[in-house]
Amino acid sequence: MKFNFDIEKTALAIKEAGAEQTVNDPSLLLPFLKMYSFVFLDGKTPSACGKVQRTYWVDFFERNNYLKLVDMINKAVNRTNVPAWKNIKFFSKLGKHVNANLLTDEDAIKYLEAGYLSKEDFIKLPEIKDDKSIKQEEEIAPASPEVPLASTEEETKTIEEAKPKKERKPRKRK
């Protein structure tokens, strides 16, 4: 998503104007709704209700640190990676949801290096600005058929034979 306005200056002007003036002034409302939709609604259409728009304003400026949100928008707009999924996806290795629109290059590199994401999760990988290299996923080589796993037949046991057997006692009835 591209923004045709300076995000930081617009956010500051909207913050100074307050919720009521933002909702009543279309020159402030439309950029604000675009920013809010990008961060919280995943690009979907925001509500046209004035009461709900005031709630959006409170969410953006009072419940959250709006400077961090503006920085997140700037990083997400200027990123080089293109995730292979749309919207929000849960990664069990990472243990959290990742929004494809808000995934920055720094986060993508960090998740790739940690092994939470793989190269298949991206259409275009993020550009690495430092001399860091993305760790390659190590492939486990299959066992060679020439090397026996057990040297003799005596060492080879089935799972049932390896388990210690316990004597079962019947339950006492009351």
Image (cartoon, helix red, strand yellow):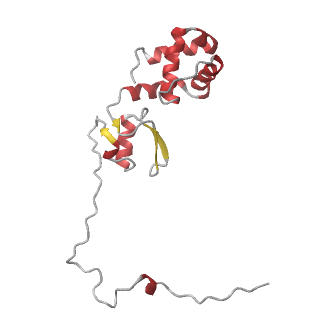
Is residue 43 shown left or right of residue 56? left
Q: Residue 90 appears at what percent x and percent y? A: 47, 45
Q: Residue 82 appears at what percent x and percent y? A: 33, 35
Q: Nearer the viewer, residue 124 or 76?
A: 124
Look at the image and tell me in which quarter the C terminus lies.
Answer: bottom right
Q: Quadrant of residue 46?
A: top right
The residue positioned 31% from the left and 45% from the top of the image is 119
Residue extending farthest to the right is: 174
Q: Residue 25 appears at what percent x and percent y? A: 57, 8
Q: Nearer the viewer, residue 91 or 108?
A: 91
Residue extending farthest to the left is: 146
> In the rendered image of this protein, does residue 94 appear above or below residue 71?
below
The residue positioned 40% from the left and 24% from the top of the image is 1
Q: Quadrant of residue 138?
A: bottom left
> In the rendered image of this protein, does residue 83 appear above or below residue 54?
below
> In the rendered image of this protein, does residue 145 appear above or below residue 43?
below
The residue positioned 67% from the left and 88% from the top of the image is 170
Q: Nearer the viewer, residue 98 or 89?
A: 89
Give the total of numbered labels.
Answer: 0
Q: Residue 133 appears at what percent x and percent y? A: 27, 44
